[in-house]
Image (spheres, rainbow, N blue to C red):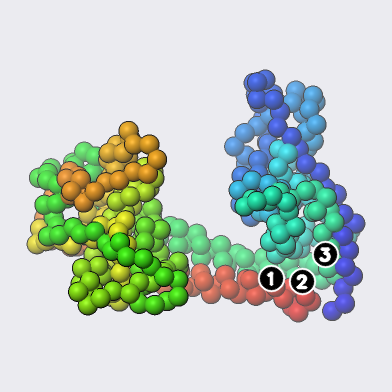
Amino acid sequence: MNWPIVELQEVCKTGSGTTPPRNRPELYEGCIPWVKSGELRENEILETEEHISEVALNTTSLKMVPAGALLVAMYGATVGRVGLLGIDATTNQAVCHVIPDPKKADKRYMFHLLQARAQELVGRGVGGAQPNISQGTIKQLKIPLPPLDEQKRIAGILDQADMLRRLRTRALDKLNTLGQAIFHEMFGDPATNPKGWPMGVIGDLLKEAKYGSSGKANSEGRGLPMLRMGNVTYDGRIDLSDLKHIELSDKEFDKYTTCPDDLLFNRTNSKELVGKTAVVIQPEPMAIAGYLVRGRANARGNTHYISGYLNSTHGKAVLRNMCKNIVGMANINAKEFQSIPIAIPPVELQRAYADKLVSLRAEETQLQASLDIASALFTSLQHRAFKGEL
């Protein structure tokens, strides 16, 4: 369709806020919401981390922004991100507010349009890895402007597709928390060992703990996929979205590859991330990098149980305490890893936990596939919507 192309400022008012002086606490002793750019999460904003006072509103350049306005992050880590204001609020200087003229532009249409054009705005910014977007860049953004009824129809379609995507995301997030809930239900709080299991160390549950390969990985896909420290997530999963490859000799294959139920322990990282732990569930062998330790359980232990412990709140606190005096990159070597204290419940109970966790991971995989489909559908509809193809 041949919709008119207009600049955003022709159908919307824009502005930005400020940060009241931090050395005047009375300016923050109020109940007026104050939105910072880091709070924009591409959803409706109904509360804020900080508030300002009437004094701040009256003595600074802050202005009240009405509910229904769109907010665009102009710089910082969230540059380009869009939020919809669900309350009257003020903002800091890193946020551009966009107030659609209700006679010309539907707010939901504009919300989806700004989301779709976020990368274009960022591309027109200035700076390095995190470019800054000016208010002028946003005002001069050229946008398609169909009739108001058509805008509402398009927004309704995109709202439904977006809701499907968000529901799947929330369901996956809830499912992701069940692993630790199951751990606590079966073993109790590992900080207190309330069931009175005998204590030992992780090494008591392993038959081996070996380092990965120090060989150089390639980006051309030659050889086996290689798991590096970034492929072990902080919440105890294997992430296969960014893989390199490595060519191994026959002699190296068994030494540096994975089998299902292998435990991977990230021995070198920042002190906040060192000790990331996950269990391999993929049946295909993959190589492991030298920053990882591969652990295999003996007859007394189960790797899912060890990983559940190290990913618990108490387990992560133990790992942080091991690194508390380290500056820069931290290291917990294989010997230190095996010396970490752990309760040793009956192996049958450890295996029962593993069975539940493997079943849970299978559900997560199915739900993730469903989320991927919903996300692809939303992206396709979003792309077509502003070309007049819906």
Whole-number angstrom distance, CA of label 1 to CA of label 3: 14 Å
- Mark 1–mark 2 contact, CB under 8 Å? yes
- Mark 3–mark 2 contact, CB under 8 Å? no
Earlier sequence position, callout 1 versus callout 3: 3
Whole-number angstrom distance, CA of label 1 to CA of label 2: 7 Å
Q: Amino acid at mark 3?
A: Ile
Residue 2 position, x and y percent, is 87, 77
Whole-number angstrom distance, CA of label 3 to CA of label 2: 9 Å
Q: Does residue 91 sit above or below 129 in this rendering?
A: above
Residue 119 picture quarter: bottom right
The circle drawn on residue 382 is: 1
- Mark 1–mark 3 contact, CB under 8 Å? no
> For this view, does 235 lie left or right of residue 199?
right
Earlier sequence position, callout 3 versus callout 2: 3
Q: Does residue 386 sit above or below 334 in this rendering?
A: below
Instruction: Give the residue pinned by disc 2.
Output: 386
Q: Amino acid at mark 1?
A: Gln
Instruction: Give the residue pinned by disc 3.
Output: 143
Q: Nearer the viewer, residue 197 or 280?
A: 280
Q: Secondary structure at mark 3?
A: strand
- For the point 63% across and 71% down, the residue is 379
